[in-house]
Image (cartoon, rainbow, N blue to C red):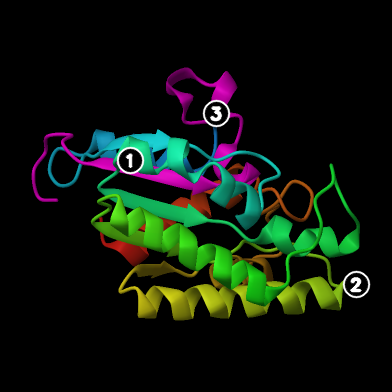
Amino acid sequence: MASTEATELLLFQGDSITDSGRNDAPGGLGSGYVAILAGILNAREKGARPRILNRGIGGDRSVELLARWKEDCEVLKPDILSIMVGVNDVWRIRGEWNGQKYVPLTEFLANYRMLLDRALSSGVKRLVLMSPTTIFDEADVEVSRLLDEEAQAVKALAKEYKAIYVPTREDQKRLIKERPGIAWTLDGCHPSLSGHAAIAACWLRATGL
């Protein structure tokens, strides 16, 4: 990715944190970390300037991602695929939402493997796996534990598939602890502008782009 020409396609996939209102934003990138990354990469005089697509959908679990994978990944033929999913898989343990139920770790992993296998089969050259972001609720120990387990599972998948691992959850937990005076999320889950900027910075550090 040394060329300054926007020849490679970088696709971001996930839930509302990736979505960030993309359908109502110019260019369809939303107002979150994807848009921030697009701005940084496009502003560079040298280095990678890939074309960027955002196909995150709010509320999605690994189940919904898998159901729309053909039209929202495979037929798009991305060169680089970045995925952040898992918060909703865990969040539903608090109760169903729109018919969605909690997704146990074994099922989450099975879904994730199918996503990766199908992506690679369709021609994706590089994978970027982001750990699910923090739901900062100290009273809900179970949700935090389940998210930690998911993050470790995604990290293991990244190693197995020779993908780049972006420690988004780990970085947000560190920032919340080190700089508690900053509102990193709007509601304990969805990032604030600072939270999205932190995700973008973490992504850039991990990928080296």
Residue at the spot of label 3: 22
Please indicate whether residue 166 sits to the left or right of residue 183 in the image: left
The CA distance from mark 2 to mark 1 is 37 Å
Name the disc covering residue 139, or none: 2
Of the residues tagged 2 and 1, which is closer to the observer? 2
- On whether residue 12 falls in the magenta region, the answer is yes
Left/right placement of residue 96 relative to residue 126 reads right
Front-lying residue, 72 or 193? 72
Identity, as a three-letter code, of the amino acid under mark 2? Ala
- Judge whether residue 35 can be spotted in this image: no
Q: Which of the 4 image quadrants contains residue 209?
A: bottom left
Residue at horizontal 68%, vertical 55%? 182
Q: Magenta residues?
A: 1-30
Question: First in sequence: mark 2 or mark 3?
Answer: 3
Q: Label 1: which residue?
A: 40
Question: Cβ–Cβ below 8 Å for labels 2 and 1?
Answer: no
Give the percent coordinates (x, y) of residue 204.
35, 57
Residue at the image position 69 percent from the left and 48 percent from the top: 190
